[in-house]
Image (cartoon, coloured by chain):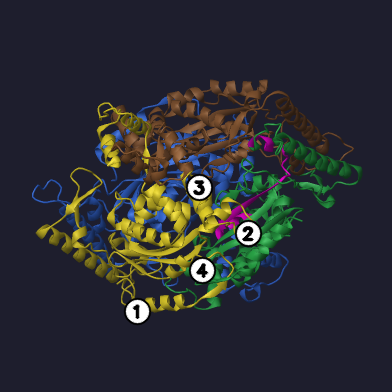
Chain colours: A brown, B blue, C yellow, D green
Amino acid sequence: MPLTAEQAAEIEEQRAQTGTTRRAISEGMEEHLYKAHEVLDHGLIRVIDYMGNDSAITQAARVSYGKGTKAVSNDEGLIRYLMRHWHSTPFEMCEVKFHVKLPVFVARQWIRHRTANVNEYSARYSILDREFYIPKPEHLAAQSVINNQGRGEALTGAEAEAVLKYLRDDSDKAYDHYEEMMAEGDDDKQGLARELARMNLPANVYTQWYWKVDLHNLFHFLRLRADSHAQYEIRVYAEKMCEIVKDWVPAAYSAFEDYRMGGANISEKGLDCIRRRLAGEDVTQENSGMSKGEWREFEGMLG
Amino acid sequence: MPLTAEQAAEIEEQRAQTGTTRRAISEGMEEHLYKAHEVLDHGLIRVIDYMGNDSAITQAARVSYGKGTKAVSNDEGLIRYLMRHWHSTPFEMCEVKFHVKLPVFVARQWIRHRTANVNEYSARYSILDREFYIPKPEHLAAQSVINNQGRGEALTGAEAEAVLKYLRDDSDKAYDHYEEMMAEGDDDKQGLARELARMNLPANVYTQWYWKVDLHNLFHFLRLRADSHAQYEIRVYAEKMCEIVKDWVPAAYSAFEDYRMGGANISEKGLDCIRRRLAGEDVTQENSGMSKGEWREFEGMLG
Amino acid sequence: MPLTAEQAAEIEEQRAQTGTTRRAISEGMEEHLYKAHEVLDHGLIRVIDYMGNDSAITQAARVSYGKGTKAVSNDEGLIRYLMRHWHSTPFEMCEVKFHVKLPVFVARQWIRHRTANVNEYSARYSILDREFYIPKPEHLAAQSVINNQGRGEALTGAEAEAVLKYLRDDSDKAYDHYEEMMAEGDDDKQGLARELARMNLPANVYTQWYWKVDLHNLFHFLRLRADSHAQYEIRVYAEKMCEIVKDWVPAAYSAFEDYRMGGANISEKGLDCIRRRLAGEDVTQENSGMSKGEWREFEGMLG
Amino acid sequence: MPLTAEQAAEIEEQRAQTGTTRRAISEGMEEHLYKAHEVLDHGLIRVIDYMGNDSAITQAARVSYGKGTKAVSNDEGLIRYLMRHWHSTPFEMCEVKFHVKLPVFVARQWIRHRTANVNEYSARYSILDREFYIPKPEHLAAQSVINNQGRGEALTGAEAEAVLKYLRDDSDKAYDHYEEMMAEGDDDKQGLARELARMNLPANVYTQWYWKVDLHNLFHFLRLRADSHAQYEIRVYAEKMCEIVKDWVPAAYSAFEDYRMGGANISEKGLDCIRRRLAGEDVTQENSGMSKGEWREFEGMLG
């Protein structure tokens, strides 16, 4: 449960308020506004604001005076053309602002995407809540034995139990000491500065931020983070955003799915192998010019 | 007259359409939406979309669940605090998209501000209109005799007339040849590629673009371009934007005026001179530690 | 001839000076330093400075204490892996600074790449030289009849001659008037401000700038601008830079060639068609799910 | 002691290697190259590479063919002029690459500066060392009683001892469990994935990265982080970088000190108060138009 009753009420109150605007509207996105989509055990993602819709993309591409839309089908064709040919600037004309609650170790990956605007809850000014990410047993993955970066099967039995106990106990104790060190309300103590006390909290503590990004850079983020190689704990946020973006700009999202998420980059060597195969040649790793690792990935892509 | 009758009609039609939204609204900005504000002889600036209002700034600063506003006075105080202490990220949470029609030499200065999204009308695909900036006589300034970058008095008499004639005639002839080289509709000619023909057009030809920017970076742009040292032809665009931003986010604009536009950066030496003067000392350029140029600017700032 | 004798001498003097450094060195790049590579009729591109080499990429990827290199072959494999998996940050650890002289209409395309640092020669302060790009007859292309953005065959005969005459005469006259309006050295005239007089110059006038960029963003620029669909006049600059980068970071450039320049992005539909073809199915545009335009591009890619 | 003997040897080996270059050299910076400057208890900062020197700034500002230097005094004057008038692009023409080892909570503040290139040591791939920041007793500050963000006096006596014990013990235990959960080398266990195990580590654990930034953006970072209001633990890194930059580009650093570090931004209201005071008027908070908070800061600035 990522929300308190008071927070839920604030959200409902805000969802109930509507107004009149001349701006471009996305009906699909209006439904999402302010709603708390739960992610992980205490996390959430909420749409706070958005700018533009599918038509805004083509309107900008045409630098037009009016709505820029002649027919929906024209817009879809143009959007697919823009995506296919890497004309990224029209997609930059849409913008979205999210409120995200997420574990610190996820936040640390996320922030590496620099082309976004961020306001994070400050642990220098304020006190963090006692909320820690504890994985479900099925996500307690072992280190992959074939890939330094990967995850293997889930831990089982006593090993899984021991790990969960460490994570829970260490989080709890760290938070107990965090509070004790700050000694809020204890007049007999000076109380350690918040900016120092926070250093005792582990990376599974939850933080939150407002994160604002344009659609082009959001697609870039989603391509990397909704990918099957991304760490599970950030991927679930990316997947939730994919659902939201699909409702916001359906035509742009559909082009993104076809050309980016479902598509692939093939090297010159890979193209050559495909051409040779289509011409009937028997191409193997040995005569492909690729390393074993590349060949494995190439074969995987062709199914 | 920067608009055709058809364009004006398209704009009116769009202004007449309203819808319902849950998003934050700025009533002052709704009035501006799509309206063509005329700038220079054929230029314009129009608000195409916006995200956020004064409350959105404080809501982000507080990373809050609801509207983030307790009282308008609280918001104003917080906004002033954020501006004074260079907390720029909350101002990045507001975004605006303009449609601008402007001479190419102005566009070339403008584009140097990199933290914005741009879609420009393409002279590779499309044909530019016969529209050129011809300064009004009072803006036909002479080169400054004291400042390499500055403008002096307006030219007068025969010299002014000769300059205006050159600008008008050369623009006209360049456009005639632009059309002749492309030979649109002339089946007896191949017609020069548009991407080449455009190279004959001078820098006072008008182009147009969609330009989207967050409020923090817009303030940075306005501080430099609405400044009295900016070239007149870009300053008039910046001044028009200042009026618009004032209606959009009145509290943020007021803080911007006080701390940025009307304020000043004083060097360590300058601060020292002020302290010495307030203590009764007679400080001159000679004992200030400043160069003559710096001293002149320092004296100018203190009035 | 893009250089005066004085400029050539300045360059030679600078090339003759060497010093001792502890920094990473690229021998291939040292050869290029300061040298003027001629591009178009008056343009040039020169390497002014660089940071890093192939080893610097892997050193950063490993966040290592020493040189980060175990064996050149290890470096090459790692660089290929980083490029294949879009790990862009290690490539950002190399930086290069160019001095470029180029026509204004090329500069206007170039500057759209925002992730670079630029210092342009200022026509507000200074007077531009009488240098204009006049295409060679073989580059005087007609508008493509099948593609709005494309170029067709070169113009011929009287039409070509007329175009060249317009370009030459209009440039010359525009520059004559530019000089007359500024009236430098004429004490009987006030002289129009430089920042205004420049507006009379057409887009084929040459400008120049210092342009600094990291290797990742340079690769992105080169992929778009050394592509066969880029306008010829910017492509020649990109191709020259490709040669330079190849000498600077041979392993990174080789990976870039294989995975980016020579590779392709294939959509989900395209991958599906390839899989079906490899399985022996006869796939046509009609049963591909692609539009005619996409199918034409897809077929072109598979040769 | 932030370095192992092996690391120290690698560094010495690299410092011993020199080569010949045509590039601009900063003798002051050559001295720093690769050297480990210790910061905090286990942290360090090292210069890995640099591009440019004071002359490179003026060379770019002049877009010159040769060295761009006429006389050192000219360069200094021009650099001061550029800094005073916020001409930031010439400063962007210098670049520096650091290797930094720092606690995670410091890294989280640092990374908010987005205009830099970063490669961080990956705790998904690799195992972090057992190194935690434990403040010295004199830096164990209490929460400020007058400022939410500030630090008060250092804790004393039993309270200080208790805090240090918590920080030490919790770090140690967290690392013990981190190792146990991963169970490296224990064939009887699957071992938790590194990307998950790291979530148990508190924010005082050390990480490291390569951080590359241009001089303009570095100055912006230093102005905020070497300021007396910055958190002590990041300020010590900023102060060390100030010393380094001073050796690298002495003229630019001197201008930065005068106009940025030692200078101040004064609001329109503040300028008005100074003018009135200089004219002999008795200006107080009540008739200043400033809030109490602003007035306190204003008085502080005027000493």
Rendered location of residue B75, percent (x, y): 62, 37
Residue type, mark 4 in image: Ala
Residue lying at 71% horizontally and 71% vertically, measured from the top left: B281
Residue D105 on the magenta span: no
Confirm or deny contact between disc 2 and disc 4 (CB under 8 A).
Answer: no
Tell me whether marks 2 and 4 sit on the same chain. Answer: no
Give the chain letter at badge 3. C
Discs 1/3, front: 3
Residue D159 rendering spot, x and y as whole percentages:
88, 42
Q: Is residue D55 left or right of residue B164?
A: right
Kindly report the distance in space between the C-alpha atoms of the residues bearing marks 3 and 4.
32 Å
Query: For this rendering, which residue is in front, C25 or C2?
Result: C25
Q: CA distance from mark 1 to mark 2?
A: 45 Å
Question: Do we see residue C234 in this rendering?
Answer: yes
Mark 1 sits on what residue?
Answer: C5
Assess whether residue D197 is covered by the magenta stretch: yes
User: On residue C66, which mark appears?
Assistant: 2
Please name which of the two marks, 1 or 2, marks the residue nearer to the observer.
Answer: 2
Q: Chain of mark 1?
A: C
Q: Indicate the secondary structure of the residue bearing disc 3.
A: helix
Q: Position of residue C22 (x, y in %)?
A: 59, 68
Q: Which residues are magenta?
A: D195-223
Q: CA distance from mark 1 to mark 4?
A: 23 Å
Q: CA distance from mark 1 to mark 3?
A: 45 Å
The foreground one among A283 and D256 is A283
Instruction: Report which residue position mark 3 lands on.
Output: C82
Q: Which residue, as the protein is rendered here, is positioned at the far right? A: D157
The residue that disc 4 covers is: D56
Q: Nearer the viewer, mark 2 or mark 4?
A: 2
Say if mark 1 contacts mark 4, CB within 8 Å: no
Q: Residues within 10 Å of mark 1 (few under 14, many from 20)?
A: few
Marked residue nearer the N-terminal end (1 or 3)? 1
